[in-house]
Image (cartoon, grey):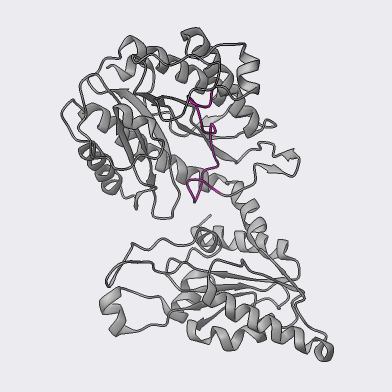
Amino acid sequence: MTNQNIYKERRRCFLSNLKGHAAIIPAAKLVMHHADCEFPFRQDSDFWYLTGFDEPDAIALFLPHRPQGERYILFVLPKNPVIEVWNGFRWGEQGAINNFGVDIAHPIDQFPTLLSEYLSGAEGIAFRIGRNSDIENIVLKVWAEQLDKSPRTGFTPYSLISPCPLIHNLRLYKNEWEIQRMREAALITAKAHELARQMSCPGMNEREIQAIIEKHFLREGARGPAYGSIVASGDNACILHYTSNNSLMKDGDLLLIDAGCSLEDYYNADLTRTFPINGRFTSEQKSIYEIVLASQKVAIDSVVHGNTTEAVHFSAVRVLVEGLLELGLLKGSIDEVIENNLYTHLYMHRTGHWLGLDVHDVGAYRLGDYEVKLEPGMVLTVEPGIYISDRIPVPNGQPEINSRWKGIGIRIEDDVVVTDSRPEVLTESALKSLEEMEN
């Protein structure tokens, strides 16, 4: 299946799920960085999922109420040789039709005048409110005008819904082509982590390790890092989203690296490894590492068809709490500690999240009172950790932390696919055993 056939099939499913609603899906806009410079462009994931079109300021219409050949409309920036000299190539209307499976294409400035005609006959409108005020004003104005005409025409889109639940439910289930793309991202990412571990030594700056990782991403053809790379040595590892990456790495400390690449088509990896900078764990570091690794193994084994993300999380929590009780960093019974959240000063985040076009990918974890069951094609991270510092007060009745433990932050994260049998670990080529971390 070619890329365009994949997008065509996605549009077919989306149009079918829309029933009689007309969907309006805008592309991302360029975001100003400073003066006259913009941040590197990153396409809106929902728009990309349905179109594969990687230009800003476009708008896609999906019109199931129209006849074949008029159901996928794209408004795009027109060809303009002068502007393209400054800002780069544009496909334009004909390029969109010839290369992206578009039924009809228009220049973007015609969107306000043509929208009313395209919405005529739809049962409702699917458009996300609150994201793009300029487009939102046009959509609401056209909708209001059509509501005013309804007594005369009888063809008014009465309801306004969000398209997100429909698109996000499709995005939650990855097909084999998508999983293969994520395998590729995982391989590139795992190799980058191995290079970083092999080259790390006391006295280096965290930024040097970040450079090693991100250079490998770019050299292997990735778009770049999927998120702000975390290269956290010593106590910095106890800051979950540490991205300053500017400390000197000290002999005797651990280095936590949370970094993943994003491919040209936006599929991502998300991987964390923690290892001793000097190649040898202290006894305290080793004890914590063994607990985190054991908890991750149990959690990965629980990523099976029919289980839930909640069950995956608490399978990891139980192992973490049991290990921390044995070390004297917690006290009480396992059930008491878990039920009363008496461990959250040492482990304060969930054990994973969906992964795909977004690093924290879309898709519900529960529907009302019901937890979403894991099914084949879902991809999630499994990332337990322990973070020992003074940042969060120790809960009443729990033991104060001896200084010999403080500054130890360990997380181990892999990307896992739900299958019909055992889970597939996409990032398995990244070493993580205690012996390998000391090698």
On the picture, is 430 further left or further right than 394? left
Residue positioned 53% across, 35% down in the render: 352
Query: Which corner quadrant holds the C terminus?
Result: top left
* Residue 67 coordinates in the image, percent (x, y): 71, 78
Q: Residue furthest bottom?
A: 152
Q: Nearer the viewer, residue 303 or 131?
A: 131
Total marks shown come to: 0
On the picture, is 161 further left or further right than 312? right
* Residue 247 coordinates in the image, percent (x, y): 22, 35
On the picture, is 59 further left or further right than 208? right
Q: Nearer the viewer, residue 195 or 163?
A: 163
On the picture, is 128 further left or further right than 180? right
Q: What span is colored magenta in the figure?
A: 343-361
Magenta segment, prevailing SS (helix, strand or loop): loop
Residue positioned 65% across, 83% down in the render: 142
The image quarter in which residue 211 lies: top left
Q: Is residue 420 visible from the viewing direction of this image?
A: no
Q: Residue furthest left?
A: 203
Q: Is residue 232 visible from the viewing direction of this image?
A: yes
Judge whether residue 350 is colored magenta.
yes
**Please, is residue 438 above or below residue 64 in the view?**
above
Residue positioned 46% across, 66% down in the render: 28
The image quarter in which residue 277 lies: top left
* Residue 315 coordinates in the image, percent (x, y): 60, 22
**Please, is residue 310 above or below residue 170 in the view?**
above
* Residue 349 coordinates in the image, percent (x, y): 52, 33
Residue positioned 59% across, 28% down in the render: 313
Judge whether residue 406 is colored magenta.
no
The image quarter in which residue 258 lies: top left
